[in-house]
Image (tube, grey):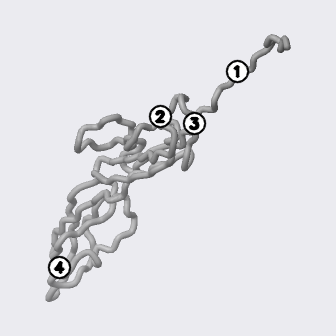
């Protein structure tokens, strides 16, 4: 009946007839529908009419999550002065997934970890210059999203103390 029929999680309107390649007969009605708020394989019962006979035909539909989490940043770049403390997490406003909700920050997450986000960078972020910072989020279904922002580290101004009360030139 079907090669692979899938419906996105939370889909309110889908047409079962468009998902099925062919049925031996005419689909009269959907006797048992699926719940798109539940991930995984579910069975749909179709009433199919052929030669004036109506019979129930079970069809398996997979409800899937293919939507990645949404990463919201406070700014596209943050500026600091050399020697200042750097709090990269403060630039992450939220990391949210429609199914999993708010995702938690996890530093140095093991490979294949799900339902988290992390922050990565390639170089010494305390060095003067521009540094690309990557926020990566993965939901429970393995969907991943990425956002980047720039960290600008400016050179600390030179400090020249002012001398008061210097002796006058005796000559």
Dot 3: element: loop
> Local crowd at mark 2 within 10 Å, few (<14), some, or many (≥20)?
some
In the image, taking residue 148 as reference, residue 9 lies left or right, namely left
Choose the circle earlier in sequence order: 3 or 2: 2
Choose the circle earlier in sequence order: 4 or 3: 4
Residue at which label 3 appears: 155
Residue at which label 1 appears: 161
Of 155 and 171, nearer the camera is 171
Residue at which label 4 appears: 54
Residue found 24% across the figure and 38% down from its top: 110
Residue at which label 2 appears: 126
Q: CA distance from mark 2 to mark 1?
A: 25 Å
Q: CA distance from mark 3 to mark 2?
A: 10 Å
Placement of 119 over or under 18, stated as above or below: above
Of 82 and 162, nearer the camera is 162
Of 77 and 118, nearer the camera is 77
Q: Nearer the viewer, mark 1 or mark 4?
A: 1
């Amino acid at each position: 009946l079907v090669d692979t029929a899938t419906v996105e999680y939370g889909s309110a309107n889908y047409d079962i007839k468009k998902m099925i390649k062919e049925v031996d007969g005419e689909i009269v009605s959907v006797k048992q529908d699926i719940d798109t708020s539940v991930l995984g394989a579910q069975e749909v019962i179709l009433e199919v009419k052929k030669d004036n006979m109506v019979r129930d035909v079970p069809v398996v539909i997979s409800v899937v999550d293919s939507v990645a989490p949404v990463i919201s940043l406070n700014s596209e770049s943050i500026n600091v002065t050399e020697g200042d403390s750097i709090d990269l997490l403060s630039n992450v406003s939220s990391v949210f997934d429609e199914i999993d909700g708010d995702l938690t920050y996890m530093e140095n997450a093991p490979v294949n970890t799900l339902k988290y986000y992390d922050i990565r960078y390639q170089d010494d972020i305390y060095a003067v210059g521009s540094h690309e910072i990557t926020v990566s989020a993965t939901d429970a279904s393995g969907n991943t999203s990425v956002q980047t922002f720039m960290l600008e580290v400016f050179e600390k101004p030179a400090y020249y103390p002012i001398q008061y009360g210097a002796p006058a030139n005796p000559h």
